[in-house]
Image: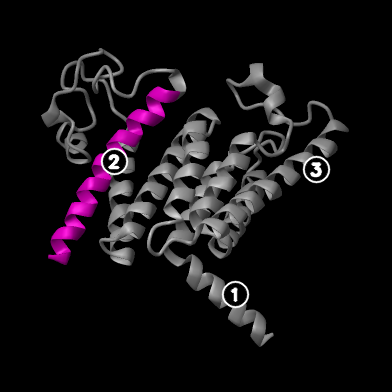
Amino acid sequence: METLQLIYALLIGMTVGSFLNVVAWRVPRGESIVCPGSRCTSCGKAIKWYDNIPVLSWFILRGRCRNCGARFSIRYALVELLTGLLFAGVFLKFGISWLFVKNAVFVSLLICVVLTDIDHWIILDSVSLGGILIGLAFSLVPGGVGILPSLLSAAGAFSLFFLIRFVSELILKRRPGYTIAPEGHEDVADEFQGGMGWGDIKLAAMLGAFLGPSSTAIALFIAFLTGSITGIAVIITGRNRRIPIPFGPFLALGATVAVFAGKALWWFYLKAGCNL
């Protein structure tokens, strides 16, 4: 029975991943996620249900539209597979429970964050602000972190990132135009002069609402660590350091690690500190 439930979790996750692909493609473009149905972005032909099976259809069609032959990025299948694997992992850790539902919703929101931040340099308010409310609601379910810790960690993460933006703005005001907007975003160059985007600030609050104090601390530490390592690496490879790097994916990575190992890492940190 547990094996069957695990397969269900995997399949549900892959289906959710397919939906997240639609959200990440359409919402930033101001399109409806409901109507029209799935269709090829090249020829506009509606995709039949048997050509829209998560992961499997991409390989059957060899990544091409059945009607016009246009290529579909393998990223669609990878997102579906990753979401399915995360759902399966959440099931293995939490079983059939409210915590499974909570963390399945959470990782789905995080995947959406990664997709839109990488493609469009935006984190949708419907994801971050909506996610804060959802996280606060889930704090009340059996096994949840509790409403007060959820509120405090959301407020704390928001305040920390707001402070980072405030200090960064003070520094960058002395060097106007130092940060170069990414290609295609030159018309909103001012949005990249704050050091930390408003989307990241709201996303940090969402992490706090879902994770609670200790796991939020772990998530932010991992995000800053991996972000710093990546920043150093791209500078070494010759990339212009004045061009920013989206931080949402690093926050999503830290939060995902915190879902599966946040408490264990927190207790390891405390134990290591006591032994020093």
Q: What residue appears at the point 44 percent right and 19 percent down from the top-left corner?
A: 29
Q: Between residue 123 and residue 180, name the one nearer to us.
A: 123
34 left or right of 182 in image: left
SS category of the residue bearing label 2: helix
Q: Which amino acid is tagged 3?
A: Val
Check residue 20 for magenta coloring: yes
Q: Quadrant of residue 148?
A: bottom right
Q: Which amino acid is tagged 2?
A: Val
Does label 2 or label 3 sit earlier along the sequence?
Answer: 2
Q: Residues within 10 Å of mark 3 (few under 14, many from 20)?
A: some
Q: How far apart are the two marked residues, 2 and 3, measured between alpha carbons? A: 39 Å
Image coords of residue 237 (percent x, y): 63, 44
Q: What residue appears at the point 33 percent right and 57 percent down from the top-left corner?
A: 98
SS category of the residue bearing label 3: helix
Q: Which residue is mark 1?
A: 269
State if disc 3 and disc 2 touch (CB < 8 Å).
Answer: no
Q: Which mark is residue 167?
A: 3
Image coords of residue 221 (percent x, y): 61, 59
Q: Is residue 124 visible?
A: no
Does label 3 or label 1 sit earlier along the sequence?
Answer: 3
Q: Which residues are magenta?
A: 1-27
- The count of marks equals 3
